[in-house]
């Protein structure tokens, strides 16, 4: 169960990268202590179908940078969900009966300390999202969504608590776009 099975990649990489049209189901595990330079400190769902049940996502980092004029990487200290425009895939994630805690995204344009939704659909159900942060350089208030940030796609939250998250804008949740 949570706390008994701990999966980490340390400072080498994120733990899971789910590719387009692939499926991952994780239950009763902890994803902790991983660090990635790009999206998704612990897990990147890149057009796949991911289910996390009774999973603790804690103490992970996404460290990022600007790669083009309009594209930033380094969001989702814990989780990142995005639609893969090159290969497609559903980009669907369900997080249920879980904990997303103490993750962070650090960069002047960081997004989503806990969760970053860049497309597709993320459903968070009966989950605690706490103590996550999106942080930039000192006096930089552009980092958004300490708990969660979504710029494209859908973020559905049901019967969950989002508390004690920090960011320059939208400490709990921040949304950009239409």
Image (cartoon, grey):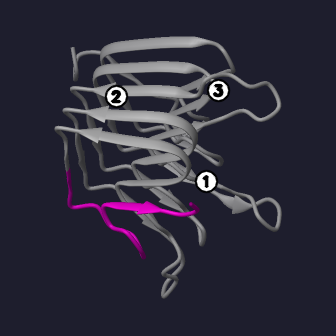
> What's the magenta bit mostly, secondary-structure-wise?
loop
Front residue of this view, candidates 41 and 145: 145
Residue that label 1 marks: 74
Q: What is the CA distance from the residue labelled 1 to the residue labelled 2?
A: 21 Å
Where does the image place residue 96, in percent across and percent down from the top left?
Answer: 27, 25
**Cβ atoms under marks 1 and 2 closer than 8 Å:** no
- The dot on residue 95 is 2
| Quarter of the figure that contains the C terminus | bottom right
Where does the image place residue 64, in percent across and percent down from the top left?
Answer: 64, 57
In the depicted structure, whether residue 131 falls above or below residue 10? below
Q: What stretch is highlighted in magenta?
A: 162-178
**Cβ atoms under marks 1 and 3 closer than 8 Å:** no
Q: Which element is circle 2 on? A: strand
N-terminal label among 1 and 3: 3
In the depicted structure, whether residue 105 falls above or below residue 12? below
The quarter holding residue 1 reads top left
In the depicted structure, whether residue 105 falls above or below residue 139? above
């Amino acid at each position: 169960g949570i706390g008994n099975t701990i999966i980490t990649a340390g400072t080498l990489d994120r733990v899971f990268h789910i590719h387009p049209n692939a499926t991952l189901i994780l239950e009763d595990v902890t994803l902790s202590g991983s660090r990635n330079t790009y999206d998704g400190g612990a897990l990147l769902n890149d057009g796949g179908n991911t289910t996390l049940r009774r999973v603790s996502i804690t103490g992970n980092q996404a460290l990022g940078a600007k790669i083009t004029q309009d594209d930033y990487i380094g969001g989702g200290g814990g989780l990142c969900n995005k639609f893969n425009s090159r290969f497609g895939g559903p980009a669907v994630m369900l997080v249920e009966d879980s904990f997303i805690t103490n993750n962070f995204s650090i960069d002047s344009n960081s997004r989503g300390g806990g969760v970053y939704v860049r497309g597709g659909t993320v459903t968070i159900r009966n989950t605690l999202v706490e103590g996550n942060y999106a942080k930039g350089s000192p006096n930089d208030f552009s980092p958004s969504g300490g708990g969660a940030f979504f710029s494209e796609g859908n973020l559905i939250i049901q019967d969950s608590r989002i508390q004690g998250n920090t960011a320059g804008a939208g400490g709990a949740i921040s949304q950009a776009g239409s």
